[in-house]
Image (tube, helix red, strand yellow):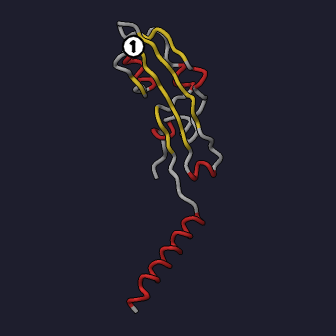
Amino acid sequence: MLKFLPKLLAEALALNLSACAALGVYRIDLPQGTPLTQTQIQQVKVGMSKDQVRELIGTPSLSDPAQPNRWDYLYRYTPGTYARQAGLKPVSGQHLILYFDAQDTLQRMEGQSSIPAEQPGLPASRDRFLNAEPL
């Protein structure tokens, strides 16, 4: 009986691995960076302070100590298994750049056209979470 055990284990392992290959590998959604929408960035105006901007759209994805007056908001999204099945596409190329002066006042913005009206995989509004009906 013991001499057949290694063969039995090998067959069980092979069967298990072939079942995994047939079913596919589950992948999670992979959002990276700061997801922004046009509604959010339309609220940001030249002349606002860094604190006001941070309150509206959050902390920047990239803040370089060598350029403290430049904030970069980047976003990339790779849909997982269920998101791909639902038809969601990958997102890349979203890059909003904000420039501040020495007094921490917003002087100009670049990249607004790269930000979509809605982000895939995210609700259209945070209100859906904040005002959700109890379970």
Position of 16 relative to 88 (above/below):
below
Which quarter of the rendered picture does the N terminus lie within?
bottom left
Q: In this view, does 88 lie to the left or right of 102?
A: right
Of the pair 35 and 32, the residue shown nearer to us: 32
Sort mark 1 into few (<14), some (14-19) or many (20+) by Cα contacts within 10 Å.
some
Label 1 element class: loop
- Residue 79 placement: quadrant: top right
Q: Name, please, the residue furthest toward the front.
A: 3
Residue on which disc 1 sits: 69
Q: Which residue is drawn at 48% across and 46% down?
A: 133
Q: Is residue 62 left or right of residue 125?
A: left
Q: Which residue is drawn at 49% across and 28% down?
A: 74
Q: Where is residue 80 in the image (x, y as percent from the top left)?
A: 55, 49
Position of 130 relative to 61 (above/below):
below
Q: Position of residue 107 (x, y in %)?
A: 46, 8
Position of 88 relative to 92 (above/below):
below
Q: Position of residue 38 (x, y in %)?
A: 57, 25
Q: Which residue is drawn at 53% across and 75% down?
A: 15
Q: Is residue 85 left or right of residue 44?
A: right
Q: Where is residue 118 in the image (x, y as percent from the top left)?
A: 59, 33
Q: What residue type is labelled 1?
A: Asn
Of the pair 48 and 125, the residue shown nearer to us: 48
Q: Which residue is drawn at 57% across and 29% down?
A: 93
